[in-house]
Image: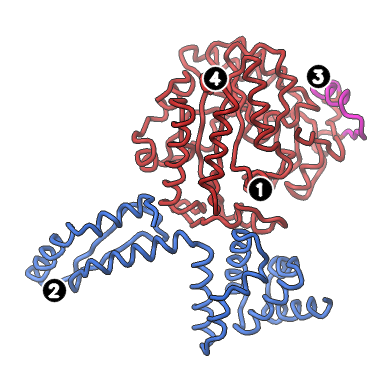
Chain colours: A red, B blue
Amino acid sequence: MTVRFVPDAVWIERAEWDTPLARTVRARWAGALESFDDGGAARVASVRDGKRLLVVQRHRGTFLRHCPAGTAGLVCCNYLVVNLASNCPMDCSYCFLQDYLTDAPALTAYTNVDDALAEIDAVLRAHPERSFRIGTGELSDSLALDPLTDLSRQLVPFFAARPNALLELKTKTDYVDHLLDLDPAGRVVVSWSLNAASVITRDEPGTATLDERLAAARRVQHAGYRVGFHFDPLVEFDGWEQEYAAAVDAVAAAVDRAAVAWISLGSLRLSPALAEAVRRRTALGHVAGAELVPGIDGKARVWRGLRLRMYRVLAARLRAALGDVPLYLCMEPPAVWERVMGEVPTDRVLGMRLAAGAAW
Amino acid sequence: MADMESAVRAYAAAKRFAVGTLERWLAQPVDGRAALLDLADRLRLGENQFRDIFDDLVAIGARRGCTVAEVLGDADLRVVLARPLGRNEAVKAIKTVLRRLRYPQLNAAEQRLAALGRSLRLPAGVALQLPENMEGEHIAITLRGRSARELRAQARDLAARLDDPAIEEMFALLDGAQV
């Protein structure tokens, strides 16, 4: 089992002390609690330090956003993200939060969940003709804080009652047992970021192993959830082909392909600041040694030919093992889609296909 | 050990290294610090060159699962350091070897691409341009002549060579074909 997140301390915003989420945290947390006033939130020096302290506070601002991966020039899947937490207790070497959260590094769970749900509800009601895919795993892991917040048990019934949205709970944990007695009504996809076994060992400290993730996927699938998988980031290292093939075969052996909602492939990409953060880590894994070169957007990626080869090898293996499950590329330009997938869907078509669970 | 740290600090101070660079150097195990100091001394490395080389050594170590000191013991690097080269030539030669070790597949693909380009024996005035780091899908060919007649001759010559299977193989390499 994954090591459960145990913070060094929990800080709760004084005005939020009696909110449902704060009460849940207080009931489940046996350690020391501190309170703070608005504007006096605990200051932490770095994203890594921030992982050791859980801050419970009100979110100021909107919750629902377009996925930031939808950059101009890249094929986008029209995904929406709802940020109910920020930062993550796990410590993946390649995590963009190391760069993205430098100004607000504290691991934070937001208390005003009802505001978030009202915001989502308003969007869904305003566009009943559209199908939305909404995820909570952008600025944090969707399930990692649930042992303290129990948040997902609130989200599943909310989305189960809404016909035009799918909730994606994206995780690297195996913390799913609290979801098993809920009825997702086909509206919730629990998905796992997957990687080659040695990438998980060397570059994803604190996460569940590949076997643990897949065992958890099997459990939620038996409980009626659809599942998804994200081979992202694909990391190049000596032996990548064999290890990723083994991971794909393990997926095929673990789950029923009919319940796989989607699988994505994404290449390792590091901004200059993130690349520097990777170099400064004490334990270097496969990510630090990958054959990355700077692209036209300044981000380092595996050089194009090798990237294409990795995508093709993975896509072929997935097709052979899992048939025609919906498969897509994340953050790639039309030219790469064309070369790997043989087509370039529009953003709208891609989003609709994934929302409908349509294979192609 | 204290002497080694002092020596590293003295070198970094003399070359005005940034604190971050010094900290990374000192975070190395003792054998790594010493090997880096030996290299820096021999090549009289300034901070930018030191950092570039250090980054490559660390990445190669991560790739191979070994230490910086072990990477610096690589036979190809030892050969370069043993050659009677001037300082600039030695730095350039070290960087060339490091790139080959850091990017073994990219380097092999680039070497093959360059060999295929040479095999075309393009006429004088016709130049082949390949994407840097193979990060692109286009190959450009430029003609450079002093007259229309010269350009026409180059174009005819070039057109005949574009049927060479080497051209197809070059595009296949850019498209991910394995060397």
Q: Are marks 2 and 3 on the same chain?
A: no
| Quadrant hosting residue A148 | top right
Q: Nearer the viewer, residue A73 or A29?
A: A29
What separation in Å lies between label 1 and label 2 (alpha carbons)?
Answer: 57 Å
Amino acid type indicated by mark 1: Asp
Q: Residues within 10 Å of mark 1 (few under 14, many from 20)?
A: many
- The magenta span reads A18-35
* Residue type, numbered disc 2: Arg
Q: Is residue A87 magenta?
A: no
The residue that label 2 is drawn on is B146
Query: Mark 3 vs mark 4: same chain?
Result: yes
In the picture, the disc for residue A20 is 3
Tell me the CA gap for discs 2 and 3: 81 Å
Q: Amino acid at mark 3?
A: Pro
Q: Which residue is mark 1?
A: A203
Chain ID of residue with mark 4:
A
Marks 4, 2: nearer the viewer: 4
Residue drawn at (62%, 46%), measured in percent from left and top? A199
Give the label, 3 or 4, closer to the camera.
4
In-image side of B73 versus A14 (left or right):
left
Q: Nearer the viewer, mark 1 or mark 2?
A: 1
Q: Amino acid at mark 4?
A: Ala
Secondary structure at numbered mark 1 = helix
